[in-house]
Image (cartoon, rainbow, N blue to C red):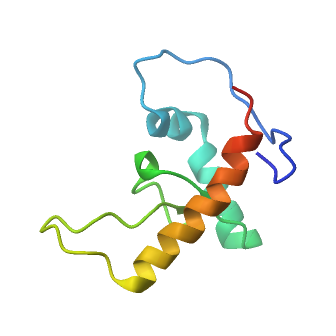
Amino acid sequence: MRPDGLPVWTSSALPGHLHDTCCARELGATAALNWSAAELDLPALADFGHENTGHGIKVPVKQPADGSRLAPDNRAYNRLLRGLRGQGDAASPS
């Protein structure tokens, strides 16, 4: 999704039981997003469901397993990521 709300790309429908990340890999979307981050300095913003999809797809930092609080810089990163993702989510068609 572009910042103005216009979709950049949509795929054909895939089976509903497939995870978003599986579909993105199958369709080559993760490769394209990682390329755009590396070559054009345009990272993608995603949620926890896209963890481990590559350096070009930025996801929030998870809460530590021991229940301790995230470091201030990680909390700030998550807050900024949420704010930017929220703009794209609001532009997405329902």
Question: Viewer-proximal residue, 63 or 26?
Answer: 63
**Quarter holding the C terminus?**
top right
Q: Residue at x 59, y 52 (%)?
A: 31
**Seen in the image, is 6 located left or right of residue 65?**
right
Position of the N terminus by quadrant:
top right
Q: Is residue 18 above or below residue 54?
A: above
* Residue 56 found in image quarter: bottom right
The image shows residue 44, relative to residue 8, as above or below, that is below
Q: Position of residue 15 (x, y in %)?
A: 49, 15
Q: Quadrant of residue 13?
A: top right
In the rendered image, residue 55, in percent from the top left (x then y), is placed at 51, 67
Please say whether residue 56 is visible from this viewpoint: no
Judged from this view, the residue extending furthest toward the left is 66
- At 59% from the left and 70% from the top, the residue drawn is 80
Q: Position of residue 9 (x, y in %)?
A: 77, 37
Q: Residue at x 40, y 84 (%)?
A: 72
